[in-house]
Image: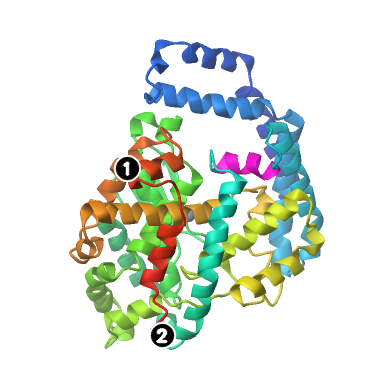
Amino acid sequence: MPPHGVEHRAEQASLLAGILHDRSTDPRYAELINVVEESSLVVDRKSPEAVNVRELRREYDRERRLPRRLVEETARVTALASQIWSEARRDNDFMAFAPWLDRIFALAREEADAVGHNGTQYDALLDYYEPGMTSSQLSEVFASLQMNLCPLVDALRGARRSASAGLLSREFPLDRQRLFGESVAAALGFNLQSGRIDTAHHPFCTLIGPGDVRLGLRYYARNFARGILGLLHEVGHALYEQGLEPAHYGTPMGEAASLGMHESQARLWENLVGRSEGFWRHFYPQLQRSFHEVLHGVSPNRFRDALNRVNPGVIRVEADEVSYDLHIFIRVELERALLAGDLFAVDLPQAWSELYARHLGVTPKNDRMGCLQDGHWSEGLIGYFPTYSLGNVYGAQLFAAAERELGSLDDAFAAGDFDSLRRWLLEKVYRHGQRYTAATIVEAATGTAPDPSALIESLAGRYPTAL
Ligand code: ZN
């Protein structure tokens, strides 16, 4: 869309949001929900009908509390702000975006108050992305992550400096990366009869309809790690989508439990599978054959050292596995302060830099590399960032539980068996849709409520500091 098209597009987005709001709060719709709620269909509260009506009721109740004017204004302002953000980022001009950021947080406060909360506006927003999660639970999770990961990152910063840093910035021809990536996706269980793989500017996974899951992937000639890890991440999302019941398509029973649970699958396949020794015992010979001119004489261990290098930086999407959650922690701290009115947009760049210096030991050289790097806030996604870390937390717990039940997953991967893990996840997570909340799914599958200790243990075990 040309830049001048944005005004009209914002008006259209606003109109559509208003029409959708009217339809989803129509009194006739409420009557129909009532009829099902009082029928015998919902006697078994785990039946698909009961789950669907429970979730539709929840959505209806939330939507009904929002005035149409607010829904329209939010759609209009975020459509405009997304464009302003992308120009501000291009020009490294945060001040052009700052007033829009304040407007978006003001609208978010209004939304939280309209929806209702127990004194913490953030809870009302968080609940939209991660049903059932609260600020106070989140504070505990992040306090534990921050306390354990900051020292680990610090210790690894020095220890791994000798790893083969330059190895993965050699040139890996793009066409061969694509072929290798597609064979990996198929081996992990991505069903090409029910999906497609294409290339795109930003990696994504999207469900078009039953039997049609699309992956858009991107490869980098001089950054092999980013391409393959991005692929594994999106394949993780796709396995969840392909594991949902097609018969429930279009209803809550046919949708992922939460954004955090969705992200848990992406991070599990990306990090716990894709960085593992077993995975590369299986795939490295094939990789070495495909890229013999760059990997000739490079041992599998040296390759994995390069892939798993810990090197805290300023960009979230390029972060290593150990420092990643600290990037999220910083965003969550800042968005809570912005929402509470304790921080104003004009002061964001300084607050951002201070937190990066304190927790990651790095400082962005400009706002483009700092607080302008992510588009989430410009799109009105406030309370969304925590789902990335919750995904890491759930993923580590699920992986540990799968390993307890199935035996060594590393051995399975080395033998090319990725199906045992996928089937376990299908049984414990995918097929349930929204029957249970993410926390309940985690607890039923692992025996413990969501808790960051499995993630911390997994990282500490896989990234020993005494190297
Ligand atoms: Zn993701």
Q: Residue at x 71, y 71 (%)?
A: 354
The correct choice, above or below, for 282 with respect to 447 in the image is: below
Q: Which residues are magenta?
A: 121-129
Residue tagged 2: 163
Q: Amino acid at mark 2?
A: Ala
Q: Quadrant of the C terminus?
A: bottom left
Magenta segment, prevailing SS (helix, strand or loop): helix
Q: Amino acid at mark 1?
A: Lys
- Total numbered circles: 2
Residue tagged 1: 428
Q: Residue at x 22, y 75 (%)?
A: 285
The kind of secondary structure element at disc 2 is: loop
Label 1 neighbour load within 10 Å: few <14, some 14-19, many 20+: some
For residue 231, what is the image quadrant? bottom left
Q: Earlier in the sequence, mark 1 or mark 2?
A: 2
The correct choice, above or below, for 319 with respect to 154 in the image is: above
Q: Nearer the viewer, mark 1 or mark 2?
A: 1
The kind of secondary structure element at disc 1 is: helix
Q: CA distance from mark 1 to mark 2?
A: 38 Å
Q: How far across and how far down the image is residue 71, in percent?
A: 71, 34
